[in-house]
Amino acid sequence: EVQLVESGGGLVQPGGSLRLSCAASGITFSSWWMTWVRQAPGKGLEWVANINPDGSTKHYADSVKGRFTISRDNAKDSVTLQMSSLRADDTAVYYCATSFDYAFDMRGQGTMVTVSS
Amino acid sequence: QTVVIQEPSSSVSPGGTVTLTCGLSSGSVSTGNYPSWYQQTPGQTPRMLIYNTNTRSSGVPDRFSGSILGTKAALTITGAQAEDDSDFYCVLFLGSATWQFGGGTKLTVL
């Protein structure tokens, strides 16, 4: 069974940084595109970033481009989202997902990021 | 900038059929947008229902089906059940390595 466990969320001040991690199990991790999706409180879903199986290709939403970096460690079956220059509108639950056929399979509980002074 | 549009709300009677749609502010949705659909109940992680327009995800009941109807992607629930009362989101691939979710449809089963 596929399991994705997100971690690293918390409270951070505007302008600060935070590093989210997602540990995968039950899959051949190195074969999968991975994606981060977020959901602000009471709002809809937003695609954030994705990365190809070997980490050589990365895509970002305009809202996070230049501030967030996605990376992966296939030896540790994990994907990371490094977030910097955080703003109040980055406050959200962040989900990681396996990606296939341009879709996102979110299996974890997400991790909450709150940007506030 | 292109926006993905969903009905904010819809309703269906138990046992009835309802179709939710996912369109573009400019242009038509096609299979090349690879529409996928997600169901979310309060406090829970979104669950993928349909991907690649009309392929059901593993374990998804066959009362859920996806299609292209006219200029939009569509999610049809045939024989709605009480547990289908939830939020539904679509996402489209817009090209240029960009994906966008719709604003979601709140479905009420009553």
Image (tube, coloured by chain):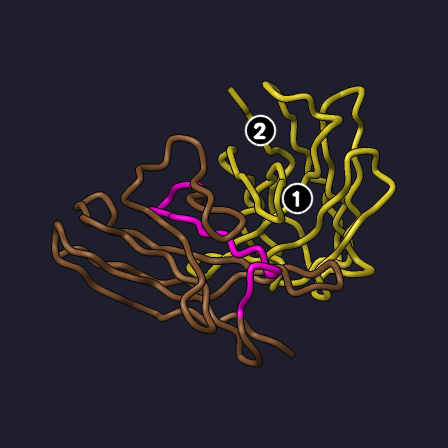
The foreground one among B65 and B98 is B65
Q: In this view, does A71 lie to the left or right of B52?
A: right
- Percent coordinates x, y for residue A109 in the rendering: 49, 35
Q: Mark 2 points at which residue?
A: A5
Residue A49's place in the image compared with B61, above or below, is below
User: Is residue B87 part of the magenta span, yes or no?
Assistant: no
Question: What chain is the brown one?
Answer: B
Subunit that carries the residue with mark 1: A
Total marks drawn? 2
* Residue B38 at least partly seen: yes
Residue at mark 2 shares a chain with residue at mark 1: yes
Question: What chain is the yellow one?
Answer: A
Q: Which SS class for mark 2?
A: strand
Point 38% across, 48% down: residue: B39
Nearer the camera: disc 2 or disc 1: 1
The foreground one among A32 and A16 is A32
Task: Work out how far the residue at label 2 is from the one at label 1, CA to CA, in angstroms.
Answer: 13 Å
How packed mark 1 is, by other alpha carbons closer than 10 Å (few <14, some 14-19, many 20 or more), is many
Q: Which SS class for mark 1?
A: strand
Point 59% across, 39% down: residue: A97
Q: Do the residues labelled 2 and 1 touch (CB within 8 Å)?
A: no
Q: Is residue B103 left or right of residue B109?
A: right
Q: Mark 1 points at which residue?
A: A35
User: Is residue B30 part of the magenta span, yes or no?
Assistant: yes
Q: In this view, does B63 lie to the left or right of A30?
A: left
Q: Mark 1: which amino acid?
A: Thr
What numbered label is drawn on residue A44? none
